[in-house]
Amino acid sequence: MNWITVTLGIPLCMVALTVVLSMGSGIRWLTSLRAAQRRVVIAATVAFVGTGVWVVKLDDAVITGRLGISELFQIFCMALSAVLLFWVLATHRGIPSNWRTGCAWLLAYSFACLLSTVVSPAPLLTIYKSLLVGLDVLLIAAGTSVFFRKGDAFVLADLVYWLFALICIGAAAGALMLPQEALKPISGVIGVQLYGMLPYVNPNELGFVCAVVAVLSIVKWGATTEWRRQWLHLSMASLSLVGLFLCQARTSIIAWCVAMAFVASTIKQQRIPLALVLLTLIGFGAKFWLSGTESSAVQLSEAYLQRGLSEEQLRSFTGRTELWKSGWDMVMDSPFIGTGFEAGARLGGERYGVAVGSHLHNSHIQVLANTGFLGYLLWLGMIAAVAVLMIKRTFSLRFPVQHPDDRMHIGMVAAFGVALIRTFTGSVLLSHSFSMLMLIAIMVYLGAPSRVQSNLPRPIKRYAAVLD
């Protein structure tokens, strides 16, 4: 465990030091926001806090009516966030009519989720989770309403980035303070797997968060010239990469590599690909040196990715293929409206071979099982709408990109790509979650005019509804 303490402790101390040095900038950023913008920021932060699990959670709370501290705290946070968002929409600009960023698809998807209540094994759970998707729609509407100027486009994205960074910091701190809880023993070359403690996050979700933070930290590091911010983003990149390494979330590792290849090919700056190579080599080289084995680096990497699993387990994606078959059987039994949003697969899949409280480890199959083809087409339309806008805005840039805003756009495209890759082996972007908050920030960013559009001499008609 000593090498884990060192590899987590050094970047964590660097992050703590640079956060203290940069605290003045954060305070100035917060005070520079208008009142309505601060309400949206607070609402998003409260929704993030309510999304996390901070104490032991009762899986059957909604069915049995026994609401624990975690459930009551989440309900309070979501209610407070909804009040703040309604306040913004009622007093600022109302609900904008600019639905191009996929928000209309998300609203329709929330109704499809609500419709699945009629077949849900836990109707109260389905209604509650559907309302949370409606809260996401409110957050997009309020965010698009107040963050409509060129300088405001990345406010919510920066907020989500730092909230994700807090998850990484909490996981590292938990591993140092409570190693028995945060570092669970498993088979494999490392022998342990990192779990998030503040809040409680499983390794797969934590790996996704670390991959997103690592990508954006490297992009932000290359986009700033202020030394305190450079050290802060470098520290966060190192911490999140160590966390990703210890989570052993293989899909997120692959997604991070793909995202960094995209970033390095679009941003002409030697520091970014150099950071990619050096940080990767340092991580694997340190493990190879500290392990004391005579194995080659290739053999060690293979053993790391196998995590001590047998060939049969690897061929079945650690049992995921069986879950996907069971999920497809659920889809065939109720193809139109599914078996109940966030309840059918988790609580009604036992007769299909799905353990109670589990999920299907594939967003596409889980949406189909939960809401049927009706909900899936709407969900897919939302993802496609965001992807099309991201691609269009990307092709409007001049390559290689140099402006800081353009670099941030590339970083957000890379983060979105990480989430898309994760949809094939995990449950992301399908309900109110950390990944959905990231998608909301992307939608709000796409709802504002781009840097090039903002510099045009005349106002853009398609944004007139937001500016009224």
Image (cartoon, rainbow, N blue to C red):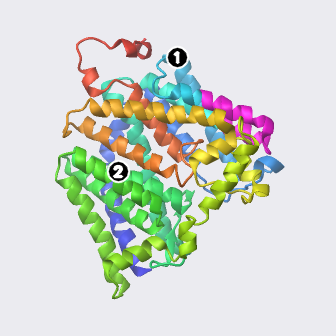
Earlier in the chain: of badge 2 and badge 1, it is 1
Determine whether the residue tagged by mark 2 lies in a helix, strand or loop. helix
Determine whether the residue tagged by mark 1 lies in a helix, strand or loop. loop
What residue lies at 60% left-to-right and 55% top-to-bottom? Answer: 54
* Mark number displayed over residue 52: none
Of residue 231 and residue 355, the one placed in the foreground of this image is 355
What residue lies at 77% left-to-right and 57% top-to-bottom? Answer: 350
65 versus 152 height, above or below: below
Of residue 69 and residue 372, the one placed in the foreground of this image is 372
Q: Quadrant of the C terminus?
A: top left
* In-image side of 345 versus 106 (left or right): right
- Quick check: is 118 in the magenta stretch? yes
Q: How many marks?
A: 2
Image location of residue 122, percent across then percent down = 79, 44
- The three-letter code of the residue at mark 2 reads Ala
Q: Quadrant of the N terminus?
A: bottom left
Q: Nearer the viewer, mark 2 or mark 1?
A: 2
Would you say the magenta stretch is mainly helix, strand or loop?
Answer: helix
Of residue 187 and residue 76, the one placed in the foreground of this image is 187
The residue that disc 2 covers is: 259
The residue that disc 1 covers is: 94
55 versus 28 height, above or below: below
Magenta-tinted stretch: 108-131
